[in-house]
Amino acid sequence: MSTDTIRNFIGGEYVEGGMPFENVNPVDGSVVSKVLEADKSLVEEAVAAARRALEGPWGLYTAVQRAEVMRRIAARIEERAGDLLAAEIADTGKPLALARDLDVSRASQNFRAFADQIASAGTESFLTEFPDGRRALNYALRKPLGVVAVIVPWNLPLLLLTWKVAPAIACGNTVVVKPSEETPSSAALLGEIMAEAGLPDGVYNVVQGFGPGSAGEFLTTAEGIDGITFTGESGTGSAIMRAAAPWVRPVSFELGGKNAALVFADADLEKAIAGLTRSIFTNSGQVCLCTERVYIQRPIFDEVVAGLAEQAKALRMGNPYDEATTTGPLISQKHRSKVFSYFAKAEAEGGLAVVGGGVPQMPAGLEGGSWIEPTLWTGLSHDSTPMREEIFGPVAGLVPFDTEEEAVRLANDTPYGLAASVWTGDLERGHRVGGRMRAGISWVNTWYTRDLRSPFGGVGLSGIGREGGLNSFHFYTEPTNVCVAL
Ligand code: NAD
């Protein structure tokens, strides 16, 4: 794959065509590569290639054969980890250790986990008995959904893409992937890796470009798409739902969040502060699961605020390849402007930045990057704008509470419902409050501890459906129930 021009990957090869746009490195503002934006005809070509592969040899692979290819893909990802790391870091500016330990390692795990799962998955069957002695056997056959459109964001590009592509191909589907315009590289490189691992041509296709009026919209409205799996903003999910409505296409949506953490006075404060620091600042707050609202029981409020401020001050922004760097830039200047706009809103609505609150002075060479200071506010009311809207940056509002009942009410008072974390030394309270969170994922004394077999997704504005383990297979297959009279 050429590193200076990123082409669309269709039918097992990188194809020419499309208008170029620039892929910018957010660390210093330099241009990483030119990307060829897929027009309508390229998107249609990709969908047609995916259809041919579905009706060709790939459709004849057994589940075990598909699992074998997926294990080879996982191994090849590990062998080419260096190239994938370079691609992710150039596009996002995230620190090397994060890209290595989170993004690239999860990419191979995604393929292994779903390979294991499909190799052992069964289907349901029921023996149906009637009072007059008649009997019937009902069993479900699970067939692939077909050609699946996979549309993903920029924050964890390779992780989120493989989280959907792996179960989709495990179930025998073919995919057309549309990575974010901000992060085209790893999806493109994965085409080469898939071919090296022996995935038949056309099973994995990539179209590059933007959303509205570009590859994203062309893909969701293309003839021949059988389902859409999407991760991104809630507003985009709503637009995709409208676009898919005429065909009644099935959708699986993993959307935005405004995640709460509840810290009770009985918590192990050292552990809670360390966990909260990760949950607020990992990937510069650009993880859908990151905490942006922290509710702290009043007796420990000052201590937790001081502890978090100290941890935030210890974060180091800088070159992603420097071992001391803990924190990268935001993805783009545009996103920085959005995050920065909340700094003014916070101030106007009574917030006090106990740490951060501005744009840092970066050393020579990095001034052109989209850097922002890790920021914590006190003084904001639960109803203030920065406490209601998803900001998607290294920021959080810290608000005191008195009772468990109040904490639960505040945490659940949001149109979103993706993730929550509860910090307490009382096991019963952990179970009780954890279970009362109106969220798809509720962690107790931990954050972002994942088991790929467990359900993942959100309620309300945070999404539709669940993926993970068998939940993924439910979305990526269509069951046919066969009923045989005995
Ligand atoms: P986004 O919605 O702007 O873009 C996501 C993808 O959709 C991109 O590839 C984009 O080009 C494409 N797109 C945009 N408009 C489209 C349209 N009309 N039709 C088809 N495609 C379109 O999101 P983003 O800014 O890239 O990512 C950040 C968001 O993603 C945050 O809201 C975050 O919470 C969310 N997110 C959610 C999860 C989750 O699992 N719930 C995980 C990661 C990120």
Image: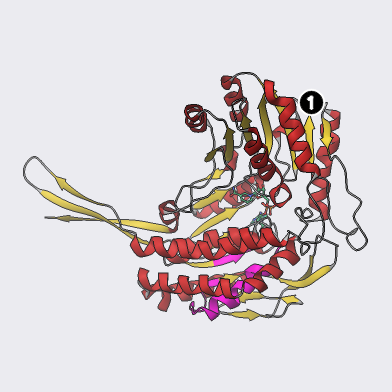
Q: Residue at x 71, y 70 (%)?
A: 86
Q: Residue at x 73, y 59 (%)?
A: 95
Q: Is residue 39 visible?
A: no
Name the spot of residue 57 as percent of width and height, x first.
Answer: 41, 78
Q: Is residue 94 visible?
A: yes
Single out the residue that lies furthest toward the top.
402
Q: Residue 183 magenta-drawn? A: yes
Q: Residue 38 magenta-drawn? A: no
Crowd tier of the residue under label 1, counting other residues whose Cα lies within 10 Å: few below 14, some 14–19, many 20 or above: some
SS at badge 1 = loop
Q: Residue at x 87, y 43 (%)?
A: 358
Q: Is residue 244 above or below residue 301?
A: below
Mark 1 beta carbon near ligand 1 (under 8 Å) = no
- Quarter of the C terminus within the rendering: bottom left
Q: In the figure, residue 30 lies in which quadrant? A: bottom right
Q: Camera-side residue: 441 or 38?
A: 441
- Quarter of the N terminus within the rendering: bottom right
Single out the residue that lies furthest toward the left.
132
In the image, the segment drawn in magenta is 176-204
Q: In the figure, residue 348 lies in which quadrant? A: top right
For the image, the number of numbered tags is 1
Name the spot of residue 23 as percent of width and height, x first.
Answer: 77, 67
For this view, does 440 lie left or right of residue 316? left
Q: In the figure, residue 354 lies in which quadrant? A: top right
Which residue is disc 1 drawn over?
379
Q: Camera-side residue: 449 or 415?
A: 449
User: Which kind of residue does numbered mark 1 sit on?
Assistant: Gly
